[in-house]
Amino acid sequence: MVGISYIIPHKGRDHMLLWHLRELNRQTFRDFEVIVVVDEDVSDLGTLNWEEYSFPITLHFMDKNRGPATARNAGVKKASADIVMFVGDDCIPSRGLIGRHWLAHKQFSEKIVQGYTPWHPDSTTPFMSFLDASGLQANWGVLKQEDGKWLRTIPAGFCLTTNYSIEKRLFKSIGGFNETFSGAAWEDIEMGYRLNKFGLNSTFVPEAVNYHYHRYELPGFLQRCYMEGTHRMTICGIHPEMSWSLLEPDYLRVAEKENEDAVLNFALNILSPNKEEMYKAWAEACRVFSFKGIASSIETGFPGLKALYYAEHPNETVEILAGVTSIKSGRWSYALHCGEWMLTQRPGHWYTHAFLAEVKRAVGDYDGALFSVRNALTLNPAAEWPRELARELSRR
């Protein structure tokens, strides 16, 4: 058995992966295996010569693109070590990376180790300096004390899988990564959130450096923000209690009206010698695009999610997400409970009646749905959502 199983989910960056693997030949710690999980339909990796590497490599091909959460879980199933380590395929490991993780686990009996992933010095741009300062990409600043020194013990909720290791037994005991996530956003934070619920901590080892070689400029990062926004809905569906802080209905209502092209052009063309003004414009653009992603998930998801635009209290967002999740899992009675609870709290608000109508329609109570939608229209005859629902119900 090897000391560490080093797992790399991979998609579409063969040149970066090969550079990454060449650097692994230079590791000071040698007792590790590498498992590359190829998460794409077509790849030339299987035809390459793997004999140039001084460590065992397992190449596992997914049957279709499932996302990094599923790919990492597949890698763990192939792992022979008691410690599994996750990294990004667009990262370049420092020579002591794996050894630092192994020492923290063995010498100090740590169950979870978080390493440090700064930008690679050859890939930085002014916009990436903004990402560092703002914490939008990876908020490493929260791990520093007031005197500038790094914290060494951190909450398990800080979980970034560009540079992360965990005891395999603990990983399996919590169910691994949630495979509901289809993209690279929030899936590691969600696992960290579950670990945090058990009161666990991680050991932060800033000397375990894995350089992130991914050049970002504003337009490309805004597309990532949009994707991240869609996955906020995923994590809020799994943990509805997170919904108020992540979905921010007040700002969601503002962002819905913003024009994406206008926001992008303003952020790209801002001419100011003041870095703070430029950073503020970039931060606002990133926020707008994230919330546009949220709005996209609302519009393409269960119709009752539209109630999020009108929510005025944290408990409302919790009940909306819990109700929708219950419908998806077939727990009809709890979904109805969520809709009825909202109605008792906000009986004079048309959207609570509309939400209950959508829940009733989903569980097959069409007469009840029509009754609720009529109540919504009595309170707000001009509201388009219940008007459309009434038309659909009347056609049955």
Image (tube, grey):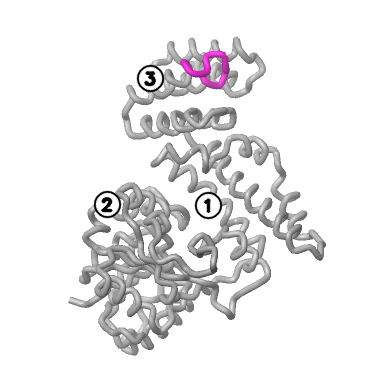
Amino acid, disc 3: Gly
The region drawn magenta spans: 344-352
Secondary structure of residue under mark 2: loop
Q: Upstream in the sequence, badge 1 or badge 2?
A: 2
The residue that disc 3 covers is 364
Instruction: Confirm whether residue 62 shows in the render.
Output: yes
- The image quadrant of residue 30 is bottom left
Q: Position of residue 119 (x, y in %)?
A: 55, 73
Residue 92, horizontal then vertical, whole percent: 46, 78
Q: Is residue 191 left or right of residue 145?
A: left
Callout 1: 10 Å neighbours few (<14), some, many (20+)? many
Camera-near label (1 vs 3) is 1
Earlier along the polypeptide chain: callout 1 or callout 3? 1
> Circle 2 is placed at which residue position?
175
Residue 228: numbered disc: 1
Q: CA distance from mark 1 to mark 3?
A: 33 Å
Q: Is residue 100 depicted above or below 279 in this figure? A: below
Judge from the rendering whether residue 376 lies leftward or rightward of residue 175; answer left or right. right
Q: Is residue 234 above or below residue 31?
A: above
Dot 2 alpha-carbon crowd within 10 angstroms: few under 14, some 14 to 19, many 20 or more: few
Q: Residue 154, image x and y in percent?
A: 40, 60
Q: Are marks 2 and 3 in contact (CB under 8 Å)?
A: no
Q: Judging from the image, what secondary structure is the residue with disc 1 in?
A: helix
Mark 3 nearby-residue class (10 Å; few <14, some 14–19, many ≥20): few
Residue at left 34%, top 71%?
Answer: 36
User: Distance of mark 1 from mark 2, alpha carbons?
Assistant: 23 Å
How far is the residue under mark 2 from the one under mark 3?
33 Å
Identified by mark 1, the residue type is: Glu
Given residues 37 and 29, the one toward you in this image is 29
Question: In the structure shown, which secondary structural element does the residue marked by tag 3 occupy?
Answer: loop
